[in-house]
Image: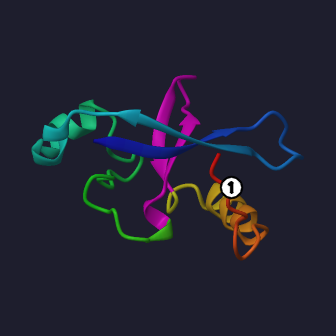
Amino acid sequence: MYFAYIRASTTDVRNPPELEPACREVPDEARRWSRRRAKRARLTCARCGLDFRRHTERDPAAVAFEVTGPDSLPRFECGGCQPDLLAALTAAVATLPESLPRQAPA
């Protein structure tokens, strides 16, 4: 099973954050883990505790962002706890073309 998230890096407060899609592999049995074990594995929001395993629908607030926490360590927070990053992601998605060009088979 793969856990997809958006890595957000901010270099300057005046500039918009740089958003980079990322993913990491987690064991297939992670779907059946308890909430406590999922929290230890960083599969929940560090602020509100939203379980990213359970919210797989197209809910924008359930997007996982990897941000730097107050202890300078990376942690995951949901779009509901990071409205500025969610707005930046929404703006970036809005600039994509309607249909992406397909690469011709070689």
Could you say which quadrant of the image residue 94 lies in? Answer: bottom right
Amino acid, disc 1: Ala
Residue drawn at point x = 63 percent, y = 51 percent: 105
Question: In which quadrant of the rendered image does the C terminus lie?
Answer: top right
x and y percentages locating residue 23 in the rendered image: 46, 38
Q: Position of residue 78 (x, y in %)?
A: 47, 54
Q: Is residue 49 left or right of residue 91?
A: left
Q: Is residue 12 left or right of residue 67?
A: right
Find residue 48 and report its horizontal and vertical position in percent: 37, 53
- Residue 22 belongs to the span the image colors magenta: no
The span picked out in magenta is 61-78
Identify the secondary structure beneath mark 1: loop
Q: Is residue 75 magenta?
A: yes
Crowd band around label 1 with a 10 angstrom C-alpha radius: few (<14), some (14–19), many (20+):
few
Judging depth in this view, the residue of 43 and 68 nearest the camera is: 43
Q: Is residue 106 above or below residue 60?
A: above
Quickly name the residue at label 1.
Answer: 104
Name the quadrant containing residue 100.
Answer: bottom right
